[in-house]
Image (spheres, rainbow, N blue to C red):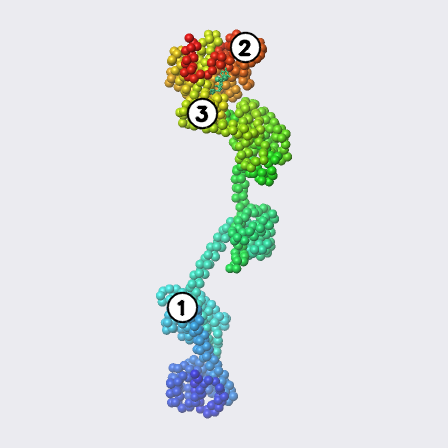
Amino acid sequence: MKKNIIISTINPNIKDYILDNKKNYNLVFLHEFLPLISYINNNEVFLLIIDFEILFLVEKEITKRNFNLLLLVNEADVKSICVDCSYKHFFYILKPIDQTELKSKINIHIELLYMRDQISSFKFQNMIDDELTTKANIGAAIAKNSLEYFGDNDSIVHMNQALLNICGRTKEEILEIGLENLSFPDCHAEEAELFKKLKNNELSSYVITKKIIKPNGKIAIIKMHVDKILSILDELLYFCVILDISDIYSIEEALLESERSKAVLLSHLPGLAYRCNYDPEWTMKFVSDGCFELTGYHSHSLLNNRDLSFNDLIAPEYQELLKEEWKEILKNKSPFKYQYEIITASGKRKWVYELGEGIFNENNEIIALEGIIMDIASFKKLEKRLKQKIDYDSWTGLHNRNYLVNLISNDLLLTSYENKAIIGINISSFQTLTSIYGYHYSQSLIRVIVKSLKELENNNQKLFLVYENFLMFYLNGDIEKTTIQSLSFEIQKKLNLILNKELTGCGIGIFIFQKDCTSVERIFNNVLIAAETAACLDSISVNSVIFDISMKNAIIRQNEIKKIFTLISKVGNNEKELYLNYQPIVDLRTNKITGFEALARFKSAKYGQIPPLEFIPIIEKNRLIIPIGEMIINEALSFSVELNKKTNSSFTTAINISLIQILSDGFVDNLISKLKVKDLDPSLIILELTESAFSEDIQQINNVLIELRSKGIKIAIDDFGKGFSSLARESELSNDILKIDKSFIDKLLVIDHKKSIVSDIVSMTHKLGHRVIAEGVEDQIQKDYLIKHDCDEMQGFLLSKPLSKTGALEFTKNYNK
Ligand code: C2E
Ligand code: CA
Ligand code: CA
């Protein structure tokens, strides 16, 4: 639409001056007052060109409509325009008018005005009313030459729909309330300041984030961008874009918070959090502050390999390993976990544990590695200590079973079975020592033994404590049969030196690795079996035995027997598998039966008859002899009561007792109370103790023997002559009877009686005031010798084999007739 320019001047030529204007406007020439008023009131006027002198005629209309004025002024009037002119948009030209000047000035001004008008009300309006801005919810407003800051509603020329949407208000509401009043008052001062700077050309634009209150009470956070876009003829034009960032803001807040907490977390991490490139240097892109504490380098030293790369920190032997490991885990996108050593700024090695992962983009390309590296030095120390605990016996300082199992398993994996052997030392005989002298005594003895045996260690033979009472020498390397033999011999020598003093022995088992050796467990078992077999040979010396498969069965049988007796000791002898036989003893002077020796018998359904010489040592070793021995005592005492009642005589009953029984708590009191209950005369009871058992503390044993004898119970020293018996020792022990072992009596059949020392034993024992009983008499020759040399009593097959209870009763009736 063409704009109207009214020309109302007395200068008739003016029309010519501006005729060449080709713009889109109508030139309306109105010289008369009334038509001028009428035109103004009925038409849109873009510009009024008027003589200053007649301005007053239309003043009212002009202020009302507020249109652009071009005043043609005499020089004398210029002052008064400037003083009292209340028009908003005007400019002036001095008269007399120079035709060309007027022409160009009018044209320039028209042009400018046109432009201003175009810009402010048309182009921008179009732009900000764009569909896109509405859809994208980009609020926009245009304001003009404001005296106040942008919020002055008077100055707002245009607002788009999106702005109204954001504010939740209508155009009228905003104009009424004022845009600035929609926001929280705390933003006002800041915004006013910014606007002032913009106006004074100190700023070309500004951005402010402010909160506005919506009519529904909700708060929206808006970001407002204000730009000064034009300044035309003293008039400023501002362009303002408003974005509702409430959502972004809350996300941003949350992000900020999470960033903050992440930073807090990272700074408190006992290690280093990183993000690095997947390159040979592990180029760091992010390194947390924990870096310094961990490595002694500041995090910035590592960033982008500034001073050194992370790879430089890794101990050289791990560098390649780590690369391999990363390669492997990235292939499967699995987490990275690795323990390795780094070299800190001070040059020290430090154990670290790294947990990391690969970061991939949508094309599955590795874009970075992220993770944390922690100081595990203290864990490593603990681990070492734990490992030592697992692998070491703290008392002896020797490596233990666990360690040896691992060692042998590894050796068997790496090398063949050849050149390997184990010499096992069973020191379980110490159990008896423990029961006599206490735990500390036997433990110190183990230390003494270990110290001595360690002297035999070398690169090919090392000592281990495999079980509480079992040592092993593991031989591996350049060994021959002779090496094994000589080591076994040396061990024997050293042990003899120590154990002879203790009058105890131990078993040494040798196992030479064979082709089918795969299970360490089985190897150990074989060593145990051989050592056990050696220990069974005799209890007071050190014997060694090389494993052979038959031993296995023997040991299996031993374990079976142990099981059976354990059961009996717990549930009782209900099947009467355990019972007693009684062997008569005769007085060699009167030829009368003086009493019987009770001998234990065992008959199992599975194994048949098991001799006492087999099961007694087994149950002695396991201390089962205490409950089983008590059963035997009960049975023997009942026999004694019944025998003497039925025969109305005073036969003695001899009971074999193990040292462990004698030394067990309350043995004497227990026995005495049993005798009382049964109303048995203690002098009819003989306790037989094997002489070899006295290798222990004589004083302690004697104390018990003296107490027993003080109650009237008799003590017999059994098996005299077997092992290292001596009369000197016999004299030390508190006893009543000496039983000469069968081995001495046997010799009477083969050697010259003059050379026999049996007669000397008899006479010397008599000198000590003790009686003598000869055992195992099978031949009249022996009996004659004994009678001749004044032996008191005898027992043996010549008289009778051991008998059942009823057999024994019968025997007395017939014999003592
Ligand atoms: P011991 O105390 O020396 O018992 C004598 C052993 O010699 C008995 O063997 C007996 O049967 C056997 N014997 C007796 N006279 C003759 C003979 O003329 N010729 C031959 N060849 N043997 C004869 P047994 O019953 O086999 O007992 C062996 C050992 O077992 C006993 O030797 C004893 O040390 C132990 N023992 C037996 N019963 C018990 C028991 O109840 N408690 C304890 N602790 N040990 C027992
Ligand atoms: Ca006996
Ligand atoms: Ca005997």
Residue 90, percent from left and from top: 45, 82
Residue 722 visible (yes or no): yes
Residue wearing tag 3: 604
Q: In the rendered view, does 74 fall on the left or right side of 342?
A: left
Q: Quadrant of residue 594?
A: top left
Q: Residue at x 36, y 64 (%)?
A: 217
Q: Are marks 1 and 3 in contact (CB under 8 Å)?
A: no
Q: Amino acid at mark 2?
A: Ser
Is 407 drawn above or below residue 530 in the view shown? Answer: below
Residue 256, percent from left and from top: 46, 59
Residue wearing tag 2: 759
Q: Which of the two discs, 2 and 1, sits closer to the camera? A: 2
Q: Amino acid at mark 1?
A: Ile
Q: Which mark is residue 166?
A: 1
State the SS at label 3.
strand
Q: In the rendered view, does 150 fall on the left or right side of 425?
A: left
Image quadrant occupied by the C terminus:
top left
Is 63 drawn above or below residue 32 in the view shown? Answer: above
Q: Pick whichever, 384 or 462, lies toward us.
A: 462
Q: Pick whichever, 636 or 767, lies toward us.
A: 636
Label 1 crowding class (10 Å Cα cut-off): few <14, some 14-19, many 20+? many
Q: In the rendered view, does 211 fall on the left or right side of 457?
A: left
Q: Amino acid at mark 3?
A: Ser
Image quadrant occupied by the N terminus:
bottom left
